[in-house]
């Protein structure tokens, strides 16, 4: 058999399986972000938003939309890969992949693709929800928006993968999302522009990677950003390269998957 | 020239915990063989199989499958190998059919063909009726069969089964034996581990025994059996006896009035014994083997190796 088509079939099988997995449990995977985000829109957008006034020259709800979409994309891509790969490890069905002729990079691509699909679908769902609350929304730069959407989903899927590789218990797969990811997202400019912060906090915020993701996306959707876009994009790409290499290294070494 | 289906050289494994599972094993299995890998719990059987199937990393040594080094050309080696692990390794919440088709996909078999092959293999293993069931609803024996179905989906030339009949009832076990014999006759080389020596005796042409990570024995089943020079028999007689009959060259023991036990040397004939007994007016109703002699020899060997 032709090696290339062998890998391609293996990869499609894995991606199909990953997508089926989160679609099958759609009540746990697709609905909650839609519900949570609706609440955010109602409370912060419609009820409190008008009292906040404008943020970076935009209606508050409008300002918030890209942030909330990014927040959903980040948490969901991460969650998808960390829980899927950890359960595959936990149930030992990882052996199905390990005995097969699939190369490690294809295994990585398969899981990441699953996370990306879930992230992107959720991003789209949240966007649709936001249109209910702010129908006038138009996307300023669709190309940049889509690019950042995908890059972000890839980046956080990779992080989820690394988390799963090192996880030894179900606790380990919720520690990072709860104690690292969520705080960084909340403080990363989802709800406010860092321009409203005192200097010191603004400078500290500049070290938060979420800020770059959220602001690049906001630039794409609304044309406003607190950070330099070329810089942010290159950092995102750089981190994707670094994290994929790390993932491949871990897989090749068999860390966490081969005894 | 006889080709080796499996060639293991100086295989060593030390786990991260420090446990030494394999101390340098050398082993060859010829193409077409039906091979038993035996040894007590913790001997290193599963570790060996894990390494062959790339589920466990080796500390040192070489593994070749049909002359292909698994380190040098892993895709080719894996295409020829099917592994049935000792522990269940499928997602219990998936359907039987999906589990097998997915495994086929990982081997590069396109979906349409994968479905056809899945149908064939599920039918052969009596799982077709259960194709739409979630795997967790299967009984233990059927879960084992599902594991075998998964390992056979890409028609491997070498099939390795780690305790495939553990916890499988007698009838199912016999069926599984027939099935394995069939695919072995059709050309698949089979290696299995088992704690039922009767199973190894029934199925296997050659055996290896490992213990504490060392190879203790590697020989043919025939050779092994021929080493059993004394065989114990139990005879049920038709009329109660008061004392054990005395027959030259045979030592008979009266277990109870209707039961005699006797040890027969390899060069002795059991017919001669019957003749002497009937001369004394004793009729034998039935005859059976005293305990599993293979098991006893096995225990001897393992004891010797650890002392
Ligand atoms: N993941 C692991 N981590 C640490 N030690 C291990 C691991 N797996 C096996 N061992 C150790 O390696 C040795 C060999 O184990 P292995 O599972 O290969 O034995 P086995 O012959 O298959 O036994 P059994 O008949 O019980 O299945 C044992 O001492 C075992 O405790
Ligand atoms: Mg074992």
Image (cartoon, coloured by chain):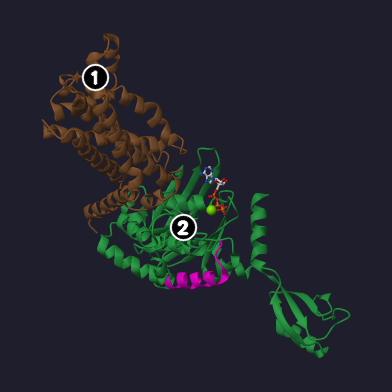
> Real-space Cα distance between discs 1 and 2?
54 Å
Q: Quadrant of residue B128?
A: bottom left
Q: Colour of chain A?
A: brown
Stretch of the chain drawn in magenta: B167-183
- Say left or right for B305 vs A87: right
Does residue A244 appear in this view?
Answer: no
Locate residue A55, reporting x and y percent: 20, 19
Locate residue B104, reporting x and y percent: 32, 59
- Is B168 magenta? The answer is yes
Q: Which chain is green?
A: B
In the rendered image, the vertical position of residue A245 relative to residue B270, given as above or below:
above
**Prevailing SS of the magenta stretch:** helix
- Asked whether the residues under the numbered discs 1 and 2 touch, taking CB atoms below 8 Å apart as contact, a structural biologist would say no
**Which residue is pictured at 18% across the width and 36% down the height?**
A131
Q: Of A35 and B216, which appears nearest the observer? A: A35
Q: Which residue is mark 1?
A: A52
User: What's the chain of the residue with tag 2?
Assistant: B
Q: Which residue is mark 2?
A: B136
In the rendered image, the vertical position of residue B49 relative to residue A204, given as above or below:
below
């Amino acid at each position: 058999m032709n090696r290339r088509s062998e890998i391609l079939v293996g990869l499609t099988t894995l991606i199909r399986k990953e997508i089926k997995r989160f679609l099958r449990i759609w009540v746990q995977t697709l609905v909650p972000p839609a519900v949570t985000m609706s609440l955010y829109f109602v409370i912060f957008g419609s009820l409190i938003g008008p009292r906040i006034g404008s943020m970076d020259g935009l209606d508050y709800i409008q300002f918030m939309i890209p942030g909330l979409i990014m927040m959903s994309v980040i948490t969901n891509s991460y969650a998808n890969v960390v829980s899927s790969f950890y359960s595959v490890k936990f149930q030992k069905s990882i052996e199905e992949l390990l005995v097969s002729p699939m190369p490690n990079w294809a295994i990585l691509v398969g899981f990441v693709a699953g996370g990306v699909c879930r992230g992107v679908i959720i991003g789209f769902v949240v966007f649709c929800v936001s249109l209910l609350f702010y129908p006038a929304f138009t996307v300023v730069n669709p190309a940049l928006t889509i690019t950042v959407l995908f890059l972000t989903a890839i980046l956080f899927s990779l992080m989820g993968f690394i988390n799963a590789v090192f996880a030894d218990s179900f606790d380990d797969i919720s520690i990072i999302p709860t104690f690292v990811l969520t705080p960084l997202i909340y403080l990363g400019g989802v709800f406010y522009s860092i321009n409203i912060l005192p200097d010191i906090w603004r400078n500290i915020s500049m070290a938060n990677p979420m800020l770059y993701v959220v602001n690049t996306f906001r630039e794409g959707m609304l044309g406003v950003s607190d950070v330099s876009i070329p810089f942010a994009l290159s950092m995102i790409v750089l981190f994707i390269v670094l994290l994929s290499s790390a993932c491949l290294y871990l897989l090749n070494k068999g860390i966490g998957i081969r005894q | 020239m006889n080709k080796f289906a499996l060639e293991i050289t100086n295989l060593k494994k030390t786990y991260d915990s420090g446990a030494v599972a394999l101390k340098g094993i050398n082993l060859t299995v010829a193409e077409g063989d039906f091979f038993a890998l035996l040894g007590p719990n913790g001997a290193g059987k599963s570790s060996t199989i894990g390494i062959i199937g790339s589920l466990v990393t080796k500390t040192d040594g070489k593994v070749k499958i049909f002359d292909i080094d698994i380190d040098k050309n892993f895709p080719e080696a894996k295409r020829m190998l099917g592994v049935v692990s000792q522990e269940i390794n499928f997602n219990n919440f998936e359907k039987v059919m999906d589990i097998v088709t997915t495994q086929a996909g990982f081997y590069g078999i396109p979906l349409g063909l994968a479905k056809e092959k899945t149908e064939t293999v599920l039918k052969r293993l009596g799982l077709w009726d259960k194709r739409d069931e979630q795997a967790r609803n299967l009984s233990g024996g059927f879960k084992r069969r599902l594991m075998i179905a998964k390992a056979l989906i890409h028609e491997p030339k070498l099939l390795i089964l780690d305790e495939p009949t553990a916890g499988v009832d007698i009838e199912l076990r016999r069926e599984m034996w027939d099935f394995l014999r069939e695919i072995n006759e059709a050309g698949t080389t089979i290696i299995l581990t088992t704690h039922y020596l009767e199973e190894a005796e029934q199925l296997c042409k050659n055996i290896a025994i490992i213990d504490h990570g060392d190879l203790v024995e590697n020989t043919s089943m025939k050779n092994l059996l021929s080493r059993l020079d004394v065989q114990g028999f139990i005879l049920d007689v038709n009329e109660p006896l008061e004392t054990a009959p005395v027959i030259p060259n045979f030592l008979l023991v009266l277990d109870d009035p209707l039961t005699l036990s006797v040890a027969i040397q390899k060069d002795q004939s059991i017919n001669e014994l019957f003749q002497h007994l009937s001369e004394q007016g004793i009729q034998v109703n039935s005859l059976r083997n005293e305990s599993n002699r293979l098991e006893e020899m096995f225990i001897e060997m393992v004891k010797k190796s650890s002392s």
